Image: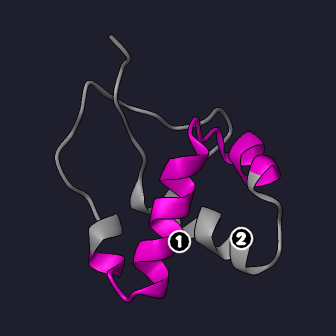
Amino acid sequence: MATRVSYPFELKMKAIEMRLEGVPVREVMEQLGIRNKTQLKTWMKWYREGDVHRLGKGKRHYHEHVPQGYAR
């Protein structure tokens, strides 16, 4: 079974900011350590629809993923 990942709000907002600046999905994923492009697309959808509260801190999953070199 795959391990679920919970990303910090700040990382989600950084990913959205990078996409809005035109950074390609693959590059955003590599730079921020995001495992799934569908997750990034979901965050973008929520942002565009004004559902930013959905990006906030929710339930903690098995572990919280913070890429190396990324400070909270």
> Which one is nearer the viewer's eye here, 45 or 21?
45
Indicate the quadrant where residue 63 lies. Answer: top left
In the picture, the disc for residue 21 is: none
Residue 49 falls within the magenta-colored stretch: yes
Q: Earlier in the sequence, mark 2 or mark 1?
A: 2
Q: Residue at x 16, y 46 (%)?
A: 59
Q: How far is disc 2 from disc 1 in space, using C-alphas? A: 8 Å
Q: Is residue 39 above or below residue 44?
A: above
* Left or right: where 68 falls relative to 36: right
* Left or right: where 63 falls relative to 39: left
Q: Residue at x 27, y 76 (%)?
A: 53
In the picture, the disc for residue 44 is: 1
Q: Locate the N terminus and report the quarter of the image it occupies.
A: top left
**Count of labels shown?**
2
x then y, percent, for residue 56: 29, 66
Q: Residue at x 65, y 32 (%)?
A: 68
Residue 61 falls within the magenta-colored stretch: no
Residue 30 in view in this figure = yes
* Left or right: where 7 falls relative to 44: left
Residue 72 in view in this figure = no
x then y, percent, for residue 45: 47, 74
Tell me the kind of residue under disc 2.
Arg
Which stretch appears magenta? 26-53
- Whether pointer 2 and pointer 1 mark residues with C-beta atoms closer than 8 Å, the reply is yes
Farthest left residue in view: 59
Q: What secondary structure is marked by label 1?
A: helix
Q: What secondary structure is marked by label 2?
A: helix
x then y, percent, for residue 50: 37, 89
Indicate the quadrant where residue 14 lies. Answer: bottom right
Q: Which residue is mark 2?
A: 19
Tell me the kind of residue under disc 1.
Met
